[in-house]
Image: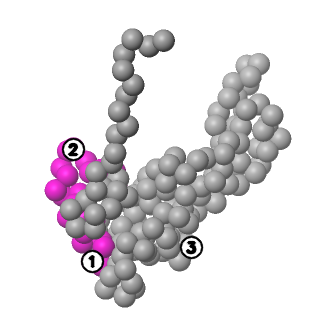
Amino acid sequence: MSRRGTAEEKTAKSDPIYRNRLVNMLVNRIMKHGKKSLAYQILYRAMKKIQQKTKRNPLSVLREAIRRVAPNIGVKARRKGGLTYQVPIEIGNPQGRALAIRWLLEASRKRSGRNMAFKFSSELIDASKGRGGAIRKKEETHRMAEANRAFAHFR
């Protein structure tokens, strides 16, 4: 039996405008070098651009984009007998959401454009419609998992 007490479950904070934990997760992933206010500016400008372009609630566009980009299955490298196998594994909801956020930001940073808010809003709109760099990354991951289905017994 452990001598220490049980760890308290941490609750994620929500952002000041949308009062949403997902938005706060996104801000923390956008942030570089501890500049949180700049990350908030980027996100809120992107949300404003989404509102102007689609005439829809930007939060619903964000949720739709993350839902479409989140993978169901991925691959994990396992070493067996001196060889490395890419073993397909199921990905749970929190991990899938984290991967989706990472892929969306990575794809938007690679885009050509004026500023990060513009690039991020464009990537979110594209992802919610089922296209863009983040969707391509998800499809690539699914293809790799499908190709390595023969190694599923190495789990």
Q: Where's residue 123, x and y in %? A: 43, 69
Query: Measured along the vertical axis of the image, is residue 121 above or below residue 54?
Result: above
Judge the density around disc 3: few (<14), some (14-19), many (≥20) Cα neighbours within 10 Å: some
Q: Which residues are magenta?
A: 26-49
Q: Is residue 38 left or right of residue 102?
A: left
Q: Which residue is mark 3?
A: 130
Q: Which residue is mark 2?
A: 33
| Mark 2 secondary-structure assignment | loop
Query: Measured along the vertical axis of the image, is residue 29 above or below residue 41?
Result: above
Q: Amino acid at mark 1?
A: Lys
Q: Where's residue 131, x and y in %? A: 55, 72
Query: Measured along the vertical axis of the image, is residue 65 above or below residue 8?
Result: below
Disc nearest the viewer among 1 and 2: 1
Q: Quadrant of residue 111?
A: bottom left
Judge the density around disc 2: few (<14), some (14-19), many (≥20) Cα neighbours within 10 Å: few
Point 30% across, 79% down: residue: 49
The answer to whether residue 90 is visible is yes
Residue that sits furthest to the bottom in the current view: 55
Quarter containing the C terminus:
top right
Q: Where's residue 104, x and y in %? A: 44, 60
Q: Amino acid at mark 2?
A: His
| Mark 1 secondary-structure assignment | helix
Q: Which residue is mark 1?
A: 48
